[in-house]
Image (cartoon, rainbow, N blue to C red):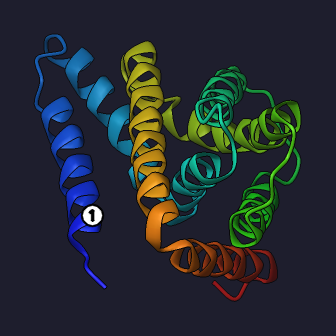
Amino acid sequence: MTLKPFKFVLFALLTLVSSVAFAHVGHGEEAMGFIAGLLHPLTGADHLAAMLAVGVWSAMTTRRIWVAPVSFAALLLVGALLGIAGVSFPAVEPMIAASLLVIGLLLATQAKLPLAVCASLVGAFAIFHGAAHGTELAGADPVAAALAGMVLGTALIHIAGLLLGRLLMRRHIFLARLAGGAISVFGIGLLTGVV
């Protein structure tokens, strides 16, 4: 088993993130807000695992691989805006844990769902991920730059997941199934308070 494709995906993701992080995005506080938002999706293992899994699952099970990731990113932004506005969501953390359980199972089983169901399912979970991000980024200055960075960071993670899904689909479906199972177990651990 060769790991060259995996090294390529990892290298590509790190290159994208590092080049965007050091790009000239404005002056002073705007740059800091943007970079804080850009890096924010990478700071929580639960968020990162969910976003990668959405990309991998979408790449391996649908023809229109962009539908679920775009739905996730768009509704993540909606949830973040609601969180910043002070809208309180019940059970944010349990819903994030449930997203890991469900998306992990979808990846592990290679479930093929209608596009509308895929978009609705991941979008519903994304609202809770967004609400969590929004409350955490509410103090960023300026908030708009932080939100733009967060959406771009999310998109980059989804792209990495899509690339990884395409690579796994060719020769290593069992690794995708194993990763999906591990993500589901992570979700169960969060739900039960073990993790």
Location of the N terminus (image quadrant): bottom left
Task: Between residue 107 and residue 23, name the one nearer to us.
Answer: 107
- In the rendered view, tell whether residue 61 sits above or below residue 66: below
Task: Between residue 81 and residue 177, name the one nearer to us.
Answer: 177
Task: Between residue 173 and residue 33, name the one nearer to us.
Answer: 173
**In the rendering, at what x and y percent does residue 60 appear?**
61, 53
**In the rendering, at what x and y percent does residue 88 appear?**
82, 35
- In the rendered view, tell whether residue 147 sits above or below residue 93: above
What is the quadrant of residue 43 in the picture? bottom left
Mark 1 falls on what kind of element?
A: helix
Location of the C terminus (image quadrant): bottom right
**Which residue is label 1 attached to?**
5
**In the rendering, at what x and y percent does residue 6 appear?**
29, 66
What is the quadrant of residue 143 in the picture? top left
* Residue at the image point whose x is 68% and y is 36% from the top: 68
* Relative side of 159 to 50, left or right: left
* Relative side of 43 to 131, left or right: left
What is the count of numbered marks? Answer: 1
* Residue at the image point whose x is 80% and y is 59% from the top: 111
Q: Amino acid at mark 1?
A: Pro
* Residue at the image point whose x is 73% and y is 26% from the top: 86
* Residue at the image point whose x is 45% and y is 33% from the top: 155
